[in-house]
Amino acid sequence: MLRIVGGQVYDPAHGIDGVVQDVCIQDGRIVENVDAAPTIDASGMIVFPGGVDVHTHVAGGSINFARAMTPEDHRRTTAFIRSQTNRAGVGGMTPTTFATGYLYAGMGWTTVNEAAVPILSAKHTHEELRDIPIVDKSCCVLLANNEILLDLLEAGEMERAREVVAWQIWASKAYGVKAVNPGGVAAWKYGKNAEQLSEPVDGYHKVTPAKIVAGLAQIVDDLGLPHPLHLHCNNLGVPGNLTTTLETMQNLDGRRAHMAHLQYHAYGGDDWSTMRSEAPQLADYMNAHRNFTTDAGAVLFGDTVTITADGPWQHLLYKLTGRKWGNLDVENETGCGIVPYTYRPTNLVNAVQWAVGLELLLLIDDPWRVFLTTDHPNGACFWRYPEIIQLLMCRDFRRDCMAGQSDKALSRIHLPDIDREYTLYEIATITSAGPARALGLPRKGHLGVGADADVVIYDQDDDVARMFGHPRYVIKGGEIVIEDGDIRATPEGRGLLVRPPHDEQIEAFLRPLFEDYYTMSFDNYSVEMERIQQPEICDCIDTE
Amino acid sequence: MGGKVSCTLGEVKNRADFVLYWGGNPAECHPRHFTKYALMPKGRFVPRGRKDRTMVLVDIRETKSVKAADIFLQIRPGKDFEALSILRALVKGQHVDEKQVAETGLTLEQLTDLVDRMKRAKFGVMFFGMGLSMTRGKHMNSASILTLAAELNAYTKFVAMPMRGHGNVTGADVVMRWTTGYPFGVNFSRGYPRYNPGEFSTVDLLVRGDVDAALILGADPGATMPQPAIDHLARIPTVVLDPKVTHTSRLARVHITTAVTGISAPGTGYRMDEIPLPLRPALRSPYPTDEDVVRRIHQAVAEKPDWMAAGGQTTTTQI
Amino acid sequence: MSAIRLTLKEQPGVPLETEVLSPDALADLAHDEIRSLPVQLGKRRRRLDDFFEIEGERSDEIEVHGDLSLLKWIGRGMSRGRLTIHGNVGMHLGAYMTGGSIEVHGDAGDWVGAEMGDGLISVHGNAGGQIGAAYRGSPTGMRGGTIVIDGSTGLEVGMRMKKGTIVIGDTAKDFAGLQMKGGNIVLLAGAELRTGAWMIRGTIISLKPIAMLPTFRLARSYNPEFLRLYARFLSGLGITLPCAADEGRYDLYSGDVSVPGKGEIFVWQPAEAAASR
Ligand SMILES: [Zn+2]
């Protein structure tokens, strides 16, 4: 039991905007009232629902590949020292699993969605998710380049495809469906890509990226998944890709979708030298079409490592940067590429990327549909979110950051003309209430009765980045886990899953295919329930 | 700076039309490799199986694997790095003299032909064994072949991967990475993980005598490591967890018999391509699992007073 | 201000990490403060005076006596002052240093001057591998300064170095100048195999014939002007580089074409040998 007294509460889901009121906690949930409970005096402090990350890469084969590639970063970063209760680890660009939990919680985030899981190695992802303490975890399974599905789409067998998807979600113990560069990763298996939405994917006659996207979005809706199709469009990062992005959104024809890391998909220009921001056009489209949510995938200047299932893009980036390159293609399903990267303010392309992320956050007018992410670690590490909050809340700070930029760079972006400053209420929306709603997690992202007691308390501070970087208290499931920068408790987090109903007969269809497609036996393929820590099966919904 | 470009074994099965083995003898050391993954199987995009694939073997001597090869290149011992350097140069169209090639025991014609075949392949794969990774040059030999594969992607699809030894070496590597950031050779003496192969790798620690106790799990260094390392293990308190009597258990102070993982203890094994496989026990064992024993040791250690006295939960200045 | 003098009184049973043995750490401390500085023995923290007799205080001149083979990180990141070691010393001597000088009357371990920025390290005995190198995964090794090893060295000397000078008096093992990006390595007695492998830029000078990788090409034979200037710099360190035309000339090999790189390896051909070719 716990009573938080006297804090200014921001709870956008209930329209509470800085009202001083008590928050009561019992048995891990928010309750109306508690008697004789220990209290936290939060006078002069700010109370938020725990942060929710809708799109991050924290566990599984890809990030673990990136860890092996970047020992130089582990050495220079914050190290976590082992104690009787805490595990050793390192932070940095690719934090180790235990450190990931400590860093997210340390910043006040209590739920994270790992955005890219191949089914074939999903056991590995879940083993890592178990080792991320404190936060609750969900994950999205990669299906837009799954060859069994592409073959079904080629044959026009939509109904069977839906049954297969339902089976695959449960087999991977996933929460949602992710599409990455639809068709392009499959083509990458022979070194090619998919750049045109309406052209057949290499090796197919009928299947196009457009059909994959529409098909998967339809299936996700038919199955009633609480989170819409999580979509990483074709032509990520490429100048002029705005056209592809808009076409993709039009092609969805009113179906729900979450547009991942939109920053990487909002460019004009014909090549690297003419690349410019098209954030206003994309924001207008977002504003006019309420079937979409998105996350920023914002970029901050500095060192990071880029990790994506988008293999062809990563090969291009390797050729552009001449830095280390890791690639791992996963049979029949997906791929992954890894390239360390440094975003430099003096680099025109990087300067545009930096601005585009912020422009989208500032120009999309509904904070319930645009969320704070950096596509960790691609645009920046998640533990740098407080810097972005400062950029959103302080126009003058933004201007200071742009002071050193060349006229050429300034002519390619719109940020200097934007006056909007986020309020605390809006920050609570884009970091917690909004992403929780987009994920379809009814007990996350708010402080109403019945919600999970995931609460952050900040000391009020004019230095916004410091305030959000160092919460006074973080409470997870009713337990104080962080106090004044120290880790106080490291409870296990929950594993959030869905189990869409499917026809059991679909296994009879899939089993014989495995001999052809895979090198793993059908019986070894599914993730066993025992691998999920504190599993919680979430309800499917009616999307009509 | 090169890199590591790889894939899961199913990609090899379904797509590889060019397969090269360097410094390994799969016919005898990984017999299932030919039949299950790389050579014989009919794949989705190589429907005629063996007929659709070209197999090249590079080794210092004729092994049983030669019979399975379309092309055998017998390289002079210790010249792998040189040959790989020449290949990298040729791939990029750099001029190399016949004379300069001579030391490798191969001819310029052979290497030029090899490069042509690699570039013509639709999907090429190179597997490399201990004949490359454990001979003079060691990690630089591995780096050379990995870099060659990465660079070939400017022309066609190419991947490379090591043929790992037996046991769950890959699994250890994978778990170390997510818990510490580093694959092996990790030191925890300051309370946080540090990595420096050569300084902290097991064999170097033992040869130099830098450790005063050893806990051995899932390995038999007494059979494989150099004599000075073995001598040091015998000198210090060595504890071995193993289902059977081994060279190491014979020289250890303590041998705890454990259940055989995969046969009578459950767990997860990682394939050489880092794909996890569930291990489901078929039998019961009277012995505890490795995990049980380590947990109990850990519990006992945890009851001792904390010796770290680190004065903080984190540090920003690692040594 | 007289030197601080430390004498090892007890050999550690396992490696001892003593990054505090550096002028930057000691120069402003009183005697008692120096004595109580922390050192890391295996997993335990101990005091400097558990292992050393200590004389003096408040000086950036430090003398250490004894067999320090198991002592790591001496002079780590030092920026000033003078550190003299009478005896052998362990790994990472002067790693990350940015100034000052270190002199060792004995042998040194691996990673001498790794990723150093500036300063001078001289070792009068032999040293281990990875001298002036980049740590694993780092893009860049030594960025400046000078390392002189009178004796022989191990593998990967100057790996990924960008600037500065490394001089090796006796034979260097394999991969000297590996992935070198700049700077100079002088091999007074040659090297074993694969010198200059993956070299991008930079200069290696060998006064003895060395085995060349097949991916280096003989470009020309001459006495380059810049070597004359460089010889003057080296003579300040007590090292003689032959460069008179009547003494011989240098074969210049360029590579590594496998990269393809623009590195240069100069191999000295004394007059008689040059004439007989
Ligand atoms: Zn992502």
Image (cartoon, coloured by chain):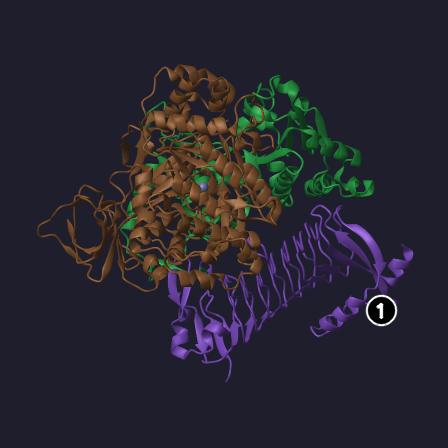
Chain colours: A brown, B green, C purple
Using a 10 Å C-alpha cutoff, classify the residue at mark 1 as few (fewer than 14 neighbours), some (14 to 19) or many (20 or more): few
The number of numbered discs placed on residues in the rendered structure image is: 1
Q: Where is residue C21 in the image (x, y as percent from the top left)?
A: 48, 70
Q: Which residue is drawn at 52% across and 64% down?
A: A404
Vertical position of residue A153 compared to residue C248: above or below? above
Which one is nearer the viewer's eye here, B132 or A369? A369
Compared across the picture, whether A14 is left or right of C16 comes to: left
Image quadrant, ligand 1: top left
Task: Residue A121: name its quadrant.
Answer: top left
Amino acid type at image mark 1: Ala
Which one is nearer the viewer's eye here, A259 or A455? A259
Badge 1 marks a residue whose secondary structure is loop
Which one is nearer the viewer's eye here, A336 or A16? A16
Q: Which residue is drawn at 39% across and 53% down?
A: A385
- Mark 1 CB near ligand 1 (8 Å cut): no
Q: Where is residue A145 in the image (x, y as percent from the top left)?
A: 49, 29
Is any atom of residue B151 visible in this view?
yes
Vertical position of residue C159 compared to residue B103: above or below? below
Vertical position of residue B8 compared to residue B80: above or below? above
Q: Where is residue A120 in the image (x, y as percent from the top left)?
A: 45, 29
Q: Position of residue B92 (x, y in %)?
A: 72, 41
Q: Residue furthest left?
A: A35
Residue tagged 1: C244
Is any atom of residue B205 visible in this view?
no
Q: Which residue lies furthest to the bottom in this view?
A: C1
Compared across the picture, whether B126 is left or right of C75 comes to: right
Q: Mark 1 lies on which chain?
A: C
Task: Residue B154: name its quadrant.
Answer: top right
Q: Which residue is drawn at 74% across and 69% down?
A: C230
Q: In which quarter of the image is the C terminus of chain A?
A: top left
Q: Residue at x 68, y 62 (%)?
A: C183
